[in-house]
Image (cartoon, grey):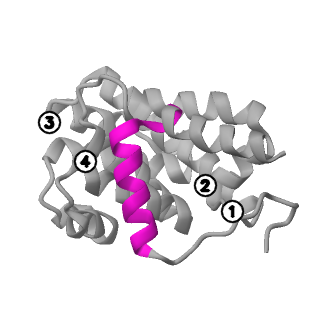
Amino acid sequence: MPHIALPDGLYGIRSAMVFRPETAKPLNELVQVLLCDANTLSPGERELIATYTSYLNGCHYCQSIHGAVAAAHLEGDEALVKRVKADFQYATIPEKLKALLVIAAKVQESGKKVTAADVERARSLGATDLEIHDTVLIAAAFCMYNRYVDGLATVQPQDDAMYRERGKIVARDGYVNVSKTYLAQSAKAE
């Protein structure tokens, strides 16, 4: 049960965003830029970084929804998402992405854990400064998003099918457009 009175029928971060729509706008704009907008890392790769960070933080909602969005971007490959969470070193992903996931994992613990050697390894595998920057920011932002979701004890269903369907919608429409829909619906309900 949520720690505060959140709207019924919405789960995870969506319920918190409807509770405080003024903060929803910048949070959705940030995730849109980080995970959807033009970048040399694919949306699927960036979603894997968000998923892995959320997995390390133990946030069921975020690892499930972002894993579903990642799978939608990766031709429905849910098994790959599971492999990345279990041990990305054995997943069939580019070595560059593995190096970036090492950085993300260190950011999840503490930004001070990222070393010059970690960054140099990622660079040696082709990572650009923008990709390194965005990896750090995705991991840092998802620590915040995860704590937002879990800190309010939002409702986090265990229904994989729900996440799968929602993930397809977000992958197709993006975070800002999807949030406009549920924020508008909640405003009408008031």
* Label 3 close to label 1 by CB (< 8 Å): no
Q: CA distance from mark 3 to mark 1?
A: 35 Å
Q: CA distance from mark 2 to mark 3?
A: 29 Å
On-image quarter of the C terminus: top right
Secondary structure under the numbered disc 4 in the rendered image: helix
Segment tinted magenta in the rendering = 160-176
Q: Is residue 103 visible?
A: no
Question: Residue 125 — which label?
Answer: 3
Residue positioned 73% across, 46% down in the render: 186
* Label 1 close to label 4 by CB (< 8 Å): no
Q: Is residue 130 magenta?
A: no
Q: Earlier in the sequence, mark 4 or mark 2?
A: 4
Image quarter of residue 120 = top left
Q: Tell me the amino acid under the disc marked 4.
A: His
* Label 1 close to label 2 by CB (< 8 Å): yes
* Label 4 close to label 2 by CB (< 8 Å): no
- Residue at numbered disc 1: 150
162 vs 13: above or below: below
Q: Tell me the amino acid under the disc marked 2.
A: Asn
On-image quarter of the N terminus: bottom right
Q: Tell me the amino acid under the disc marked 3.
A: Leu
Residue positioned 15% across, 32% down in the render: 124
141 vs 6: above or below: above
Whole-percent x, y for residue 149 in the image = 67, 57
Along the horizontal axis of the image, is 173 left or right of 126? right
Q: Earlier in the sequence, mark 1 or mark 4?
A: 4
Q: Earlier in the sequence, mark 3 or mark 4?
A: 4
Whole-percent x, y for residue 102 in the image = 33, 50
Q: Earlier in the sequence, mark 3 or mark 1?
A: 3
Question: Residue 73 — which label?
Answer: 4
* Label 2 close to label 3 by CB (< 8 Å): no
Which secondary structure type mostly characterizes the magenta part of the structure? helix
